[in-house]
Amino acid sequence: MVALDELSAVYHRASGITHVVASPAPEILDALSGPAMSADALLMVLTIRYDLADADPAALAARLDELLMAGLVVAQ
């Protein structure tokens, strides 16, 4: 992942496609760079890491679905 001002470029090796993403995608991908975790655990990590007062599970689920459709994350 390469930061480009307010956007980030993410190269997907399997497809050879470079995706340009905006926040919160880079933060989500960074949090998922370690061991696999549930959406609830991810929300907790993001809430702690970024001091989120109004963390929304539905919004996170929507962002994860977008990343899944782009092939940048896999469901387990």
Image (cartoon, rainbow, N blue to C red):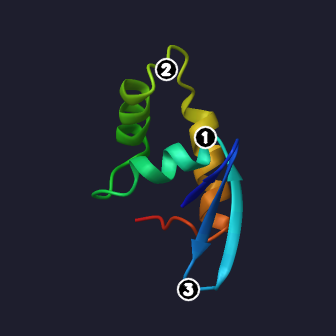
The residue at the far left in this view is: 35
Percent across and percent down for residue 39 are 44, 44
| Residue identifier under label 2 | 52
Question: Residue 64 at x, y = what percent?
Answer: 58, 51
Q: Is residue 24 above or below residue 76?
A: above
Question: Could you tell me which residue is drawn at 70 percent across and 41 percent down?
Answer: 6
- Position of 23 with respect to 32 (left or right) is right
Q: Please name the residue shown 58% across and 76% down the image.
A: 12
Left/right placement of residue 36 relative to residue 6 reads left
Q: How many discs mark residues in the rendered view?
A: 3
Q: Quadrant of the N terminus?
A: bottom right
Q: Element under label 2?
A: loop
Within 10 Å of the Cα at label 1, are there few (<14), some (14-19), or many (20+) other Cα atoms?
A: few
**Secondary element at tag 3:** loop
Percent across and percent down for residue 9 are 65, 61
* Between 9 and 44, the one nearer to me in the picture: 9
Residue drawn at (58%, 44%) of the image: 61
Verify CB contact (< 8 Å) between mark 3 and mark 1. Answer: no
Q: Label 1, on which residue? A: 24
**Which numbered marker is on residue 72?**
none
Q: Is residue 50 above or below residue 15?
A: above
Label 3 is placed on what type of residue? Ala
Estimate how packed mark 3 is, as few (under 14), some (14 to 19) or many (20 or more) residues with alpha carbons within 10 Å.
Answer: few
Instruction: Report the residue marked by disc 3.
Output: 14
